Image: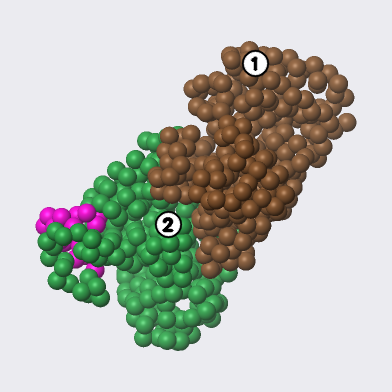
Chain colours: A green, B brown
Amino acid sequence: MSDIAIGIDIGGTNSRFGVVTSSGEVLKEARFPTKEYPKVEEFVEALSSKIKSVLKEFEGYTFKGIGVGAPNGNYFTGTIENAPNLIWEGFVPFVDLFKKFFDTPVILTNDANAAAIGEMMFGGAKKMKNFILITLGTGLGSGIVVNGDLLYGHDGFAGEMGHLFLYNGTGRKCGCGRRGCLETYASAQGIKRTMFELLTNETEESELRDIPYSQMTSEHIYEAAKKGDTLAKKAFDITGEYLGIKLADAVAFTSPETIFLYGGLAKAGDMILNPTRKYFDKYVLNVFRGKTSILYSDLREKHGAILGAAALVWKQRK
Amino acid sequence: MSDIAIGIDIGGTNSRFGVVTSSGEVLKEARFPTKEYPKVEEFVEALSSKIKSVLKEFEGYTFKGIGVGAPNGNYFTGTIENAPNLIWEGFVPFVDLFKKFFDTPVILTNDANAAAIGEMMFGGAKKMKNFILITLGTGLGSGIVVNGDLLYGHDGFAGEMGHLFLYNGTGRKCGCGRRGCLETYASAQGIKRTMFELLTNETEESELRDIPYSQMTSEHIYEAAKKGDTLAKKAFDITGEYLGIKLADAVAFTSPETIFLYGGLAKAGDMILNPTRKYFDKYVLNVFRGKTSILYSDLREKHGAILGAAALVWKQRK
C-alpha cells in the first residue's frame, strides 16, 4: 500500500483535514469546528483524537506525517504568530502541541504558502521554478516560489503581498493597523468596499443598493455582475485594476513565469481574471511584457488547502 | 601566487575594470571610455587588448575569469538587453564578444546584482542569506539575495525595484515609458525632481534657486543641506520617505535581514539614511518591525562595482 499524509487547513471558523496520498489523491476529508475551542491545547487534543480515529481506516498505509497550513503559520519556528482571524492570541506553539500526540513529522506554514506548495506538487506549477500564488479570500495572501523553493525570508514571513501598499499609508484602513494595503482593495472584503464606494459615488440603479454593508458578500456582487448589473461589473473591473497594478510590481520583484489566482474571489473566474490580465498588461514594465501568464490555480476546486498542507510532508521528504 | 579575476563595471560614459584576488583585494584598477566606442565590437576588442596588457603585470597569478556588471546585463543569456543608458542599442551578445578574446569564463549580470554579490562575498553581507542591496545612482537598481542566491526569476531580470510603482502609473514620467516609478523619486535624478518641486511649491529662500534644472546635481542639494538650507534638507527627508515606503513593501515581499544602500546618493550618508530609516519604521508591517536593518553598503567607497563583478567569477566557482 502507498504512503499517506494528513493535510490540515486551519480556518477561523472551521478547519478541515484530509488523508492524502503522495500522488495528491485525497482519500478522505473532514471538517472540524475551530471556533468551539477557545483554548488551542484543547483544539489540538480533540483534533488529534479525531485524526487518529480516521487513520484507523487506513491501517494498510504508511503514515508519513502531518502538514498544517494556518494564517501566520511560521515554517521556521512551528508557531502561529498573532493571527488576526484566529481565536487563539499571541504565539501558539502549534507544532509542539501536535507532537505530543504524534510521532511523525509535523510541519507548519502559512495557508498561502501551503497552497503554493500544493500547486507546485500537484497543480499547474509542476514544472515551474518561479511562480507566485495569490489567495483571494477574506484577505489576500501569497506564496512566492523562487528557484523551486518557497520564499521564506530570514524570519519565515516573506510573501505578505496582501500588505503591499496600493496607496502609501493612505486610503482604506487595514486589519494590520495601517492604511492603503492591497488586501483592503483586492480581496472578498476589498471588492465589497469598492462596491460601496461605487454605490456612494455613482447614480446607476443596482439591486445591491438593497443589501446592508454587514450582509453583503462578494458572492452578491458576482451574482449581480452576472446578471449585468453595471456597478457590480465595474467593481470587478476596478478590483482587477488594483490587482493588476500590484502584480506588475510583483513581477518587477521576482519575475515569475506564472501568477496563479486561488481562493474564494478567484471562483468568480473570468469576471476577475480578465480585468486583472488587462490591467497587468497595461502596467507591467516593458522588459517583462508578454513573459508572465496569469492563470487560475489548478487546485481551486480540488481541496487545494488540504493538498497543499499535505504536500509539505512530501516536499519535506524530497 | 594566488588566483585573480578581472571585474568590469560598464557605465554609460566610462567603464572601469580591476584585477581582484579571491579574497577581494583590488590589485590594480583602470578606466576605459565607453562612449568613444559606438560599436560594441570595437569596444570589446579595445578593452580586451587593454586587459591583456594589464594581465602581463600579473604573470605569476592564475587568471580565473572575467565578471562583468552592466545595466540590463542578463546573467542567463550573457546579453545586455535594451540598456537605456548605454550607447549600444538592442540586444548585445556581450559574453560571446568577450569569449573571442579570452579562454576563461566570462560572466555577466546587471550592475546592481554584481554589487549585491560583492556585498555577499566581501562586504557587510558575508554571513547573510537574505538581504537586498539598493543602488542609488542616476536611477535606482536592486540586487535581491534569497536563501544565499541572487534572485534572477524565470528570465534573469528579477529585482527591478527602481520600477516598482510609488504611484500607480501616475506622477513623474520614467525612462521606462511609464509614470510613478520609484526611481523617478528615489535616486540622484529623483531628489533633483523633488528639489524642483519644493522650489516651485514653497517660498523659502534657497541658494539652489540660482541653479538651472540642467545644471543641478544631487551633490548641489547635499552641499546646500549640509549648510542648513531648509528646502534641501526637506528634499532629503522626502526622498527618505519615498524610499522608506517602498522598502517596507520590499520587506513584505522577501523579508531580508538587512537592506544595504549603495551608490552615488548613498554617499550623502546619514542625510539620506536617517530619514529612510525613520519612514521605514513608520510604514513597515507590524510582524517585520525591528527585524530588518538599513545600512550603508560596506563597499560603497571601495571599488564596489569592480569587486562585485569579479565576485561573479569566485561565486561561480563555489
Q: Give B240 or B290, whichever is nearer the viewer.
A: B240
Q: Residue at x 54, y 62 (%)?
A: B284
Along the horizontal axis of the image, is B295 left or right of A147?
right
On the image, which quarter does residue A256 sit in?
top left
- Quarter occupied by the N terminus of chain B: top right
Label 1 sits on residue? B36
**What residue is at 54 percent from the left and 71 percent from the top?**
A78
Query: In x, y percent, where is residue A309?
Result: 42, 64
Kind of residue at badge 2: Tyr
Residue appearing at x 34%, y 76% in the figure: A14
Circle 2 residues within 10 Å: few <14, some 14–19, many ≥20: some
Q: Quadrant of the C terminus of chain B?
A: top right
Of residues B226 and A193, the one nearer the viewer is B226
Q: Residues within 10 Å of mark 1 (few under 14, many from 20)?
A: few
Q: Chain of mark 1?
A: B
Q: A82 or A10, which lies in front?
A: A82
SS class, disc 1: helix
Question: Residue B303: x, y in percent?
Answer: 75, 36
Task: Report the residue at 21% width, 63% height from top.
Answer: A199
* Residue A173 seen: yes
- Looking at the rendered structure, the kind of residue marked 1 is Glu
Q: Which mark is residue A167?
A: 2
Q: Residue B167, relative to residue A169: is it above or below?
A: above
Residue numbers of the magenta segment: A217-236
Up/down of B45 relative to B61, above or below: above
Q: Secondary structure at mark 2?
A: loop
Marked residue chain, label 2:
A
Magenta stretch prevailing secondary structure = helix
